[in-house]
Image (spheres, helix red, strand yellow):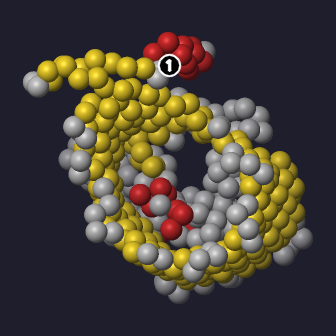
Amino acid sequence: MKQKLLVAGILAAYAVSAPGWAQTTTAAGTAAAQSSVTIYGDLDEYMGYIKSSNGSSVIGLDDGAFLRSRLGFRGLEDLGGGYKTTFDLEQGLSGVNGSAADSSRLFDRQAWVGMKTPVGEFRFGRQNTTIFFNGAAIDFTERTTMGSVINTFGVPSRFDNDISFLSERMAGFKLELHYAMTNATSATQNKPVIQQALDYQNGPFRVGYMGLEASPSGNAVTVNEKIQYQNLYADYNYGAGSIYTAYVRSNNITSSANGNTAAAILSNVSIVNNFFPGTDINAERFFNIYQISADYHINERFKVGTLYGVIKDTSGGNAGASGGNVGGFYDLSKRTMLYGFVNYLKNEANGGFRFSGSGSIAANLAGSAVNGQSLTGLQFGIVHRF
């Protein structure tokens, strides 16, 4: 009820005050500053079918094979002189049943305030990681769909208490830095999640690096390996489409009864006083992920693409996987898009990977239907943005 009242209050306030004009006084005199607020979001619903080589299968209506359904409020105030106050509040939703993606939060995806300056933007609060935000550089699916092998492994998405800097693009380069704190009182537990990224674009070429590190915390650390996610990519736009290559090295994975992607040592969506206790031996097990994909624009509305990726278990534990995807996107309008994917994933004997979407998959397989098995998937969906 409190959440509903707060959302109603926000909407009422916006209806009264935005967009509008505010007067600000500076040392040079009085200047007019423009303020605006945008209500935005999307709904992504799809029919999905997944079949295992052990004979198990599941079919269902789900949310977020391409984009997680969401509702957001984005705004800025132009302060003049190249400075702007910015903010973003975003809540993930399920279009299937109308529930919140995270019932413990009012805005689970983003909740930050920032300041744009002539050199870049500073942000403070819960934010998307640079790894998640730049998914369009990784593959034709934008990395967040069920067709991406990199997404199958797992992608760090967002963290609390994050201080970030996003530079303007200069001479083709753009820098991004993040420092997410635990706010813990204990020095041994106050270990930040640090991110850095550098993107370069020049004509049809785009190359870049994105990385994340978090140190073990607690008084009983027995495994000193940092949790890491390192990502390199290189793209080429050949005119009618693009070719994407990407490499990931990470140890943010652990085993469970539902497969190796069912849990991570460091949460991909939140931080607590202990990022990880430094006792999980799986932190010493690194995976290398190699992926290549390409797309082709048949016309201005219709795009098709294909993808292939390999997950290598460098520990020799025979817990990797390989897979591929063929898909297409068709724009009915500027706001509405149809999409479809055919996916294949083959686990090694001790591998337990399964398809992952932008949203959590309710109609999914687990346990013996995943571990050491091959999976085939088929999805058809619709996305409407507003």
Would you name the residue on which mark 1 appears?
14
Vertical placement of 156 versus 71: above or below?
Answer: below
Percent position of residue 316, x then y: 53, 87
Q: Residue furthest bottom?
A: 316
Quarter holding residue 351: bottom right
Residue 360 visible, this angle: no
Vertical placement of 75 versus 169: above or below?
Answer: above
Percent position of residue 287, x then y: 50, 77
Task: Give the quarter of the figure containing the C terminus.
Answer: top right
| 293 left or right, relative to 156 | right
Percent position of residue 363, x then y: 79, 52
Query: Looking at this view, is 313 or 279 the one in front?
Result: 313
| 110 left or right, relative to 169 | right
Query: Looking at this view, is 125 or 12 the one in front?
Result: 12
Percent position of residue 173, x then y: 31, 67
Query: Looking at this view, is 194 or 214 the one in front?
Result: 194
The number of numbered discs placed on residues in the rendered structure image is 1
Quarter holding residue 25: top left
Task: Give the quarter of the figure containing the N terminus.
Answer: top right
Badge 1 amino acid? Tyr
Count neighbours of disc 1 (C-alpha within 10 A) and say few if under 14, some if 14 to 19, many if 20 or more: some
Residue at 37%, 55% in the rendered image: 277
Residue at 68%, 75% in the rendered image: 296
Vertical placement of 208 versus 169: above or below?
Answer: below
| 186 left or right, relative to 152 | left
Quarter holding residue 98: top right
